[in-house]
Image (cartoon, coloured by chain):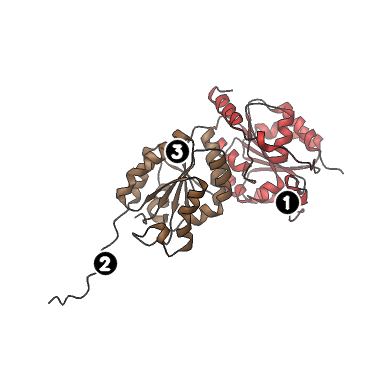
Amino acid sequence: MSRMDRMEALQVLKRHITNEIVVGTYSTGFDWASITERPLNYFAVGAMGLGSSHGLGLALARPERKIVVLDGDGGLLMNLGTLVTIGKVAPKNLVHFVFKNNTYEANGGHPIPNTGVDFETIARGAGIPNVATCKTVADFEKNIANWLTIDGPTFVCMEIEQGWLGRRDYSNMYSASRRQALKEALAAGA
Amino acid sequence: MDDAGPKPAAPPPALHGEKILAAVRAAKIDYVLSVPDLHTSLGLLKPIAGADDLKLIRVCKEDETLGIAAGLQYGDKRSLILIQYTGFMYASNAIRAVAVEHKQPMVMMIGLLGKEPGVAPQQSKRYGVRILEPLLDVMGIRRILIETDADVPLIAPAIEEAYATSRPVAILIGGKPA
């Protein structure tokens, strides 16, 4: 069975996103920005692995709003302790998707140290109450509404194909204007 | 002739954790993000853990604090990062990116474990303590040094300035808070 195409999955997610803050990282964040530009996009680049930590801070500061983190497997491996922290703090409004393509895609497509790593089991062991692994777009379609609405924290491992390995221009993703747009949107209650 | 023998050395001037925490509260800090540090364990982290008005988030590694602090800041919540100098060095890439390059008002309170009382950090016999201030300087991070209670009034204005200018600040805890 082939793995999911990340862009197909993100197109499904886009149809379900309204006023959530979406925290994107690296390749997944880049693809997300390419299909939906919105002030409530927040990009965590520059220090790989911290996407879910940014998301946790947002979740604590804005408990009335869902925070959706689009993480990568390489990034999560650089900050595995984040799952323990999230499991303890347990924000109900945090949904953490990890797109697992078994590579450091943003760094040349080299494999992660152990492609057999079971993130769902690790997340469960870290104390995150809602955990799942998603293998098909159809499965994603079936469950996404629930994952976005149930009390979290929620962790979903998305098994995807490796994406494009070409050079991406991240310079726009964490620009001052984007940060300002996000602050203004939050202040306006968007 | 005085036959009382050598007089004991005068104790180092005191630094009280409660005074530091009063300054932190005065600067409207909501959250404390921390990895434990023996230097500040009893004087700061323990009372913070028991406080009702400061929300403590215990993290696994120091770089987590930078991401959490950034997210909190977007929601208009202030936070204090309480770590040891070794943790600063561990998290230096996150500090470089999230705090310095992204111009975020990160407030880092950094314990100088092992620094000799009354000795300037750059004169310490401990290599890690000795290089911290030069590292901060080369990263362009403003710093203040808290050795005794007399230095505590520097804390709240430094935090306010960090938020007013959207820049990081390092509050070095040189004395050991009691």
Q: In terms of sequence position, does the residue under pointer 3 or pointer 2 come before the other?
A: 2
Secondary structure under badge 2?
A: loop
Discs 1, 2 touching: Cβ within 8 Å = no
* Shade representing chain B: brown
Can you see residue B84? no
| Residue A146 x, y percent position in the rendering | 70, 33
Q: CA distance from mark 1 to mark 2?
A: 58 Å
Question: Please, what is the three-letter code of the amino acid marked with disc 3?
Answer: Ala
| Residue A36 x, y percent position in the rendering | 71, 27
Discs 3, 2 touching: Cβ within 8 Å = no
- Residue under numbered circle 2: B9
Secondary structure under badge 3?
A: helix
Q: Chain of mark 1?
A: A
Q: Which chain is red?
A: A
Q: Chain of mark 3?
A: B
**Which residue is situated farthest in the left direction here?**
B1
Question: Please, what is the three-letter code of the amino acid marked with disc 2?
Answer: Ala
Q: CA distance from mark 1 to mark 3?
A: 41 Å
**Rendered image quadrant of residue A4:** top right
Identified at 45% across, 59% down, the residue is B130
Q: Residues within 10 Å of mark 2 (few under 14, many from 20)?
A: few
Viewer-proximal residue among B144 and A25: B144
Residue B157 vertical position relative to residue B49 in the rendered view, above or below:
above
| Residue B49 x, y percent position in the rendering | 43, 48
Q: Which mark is residue B162?
A: 3
Q: Which mark is residue A118?
A: 1
Question: Please, what is the three-letter code of the amino acid marked with disc 1?
Answer: Asp
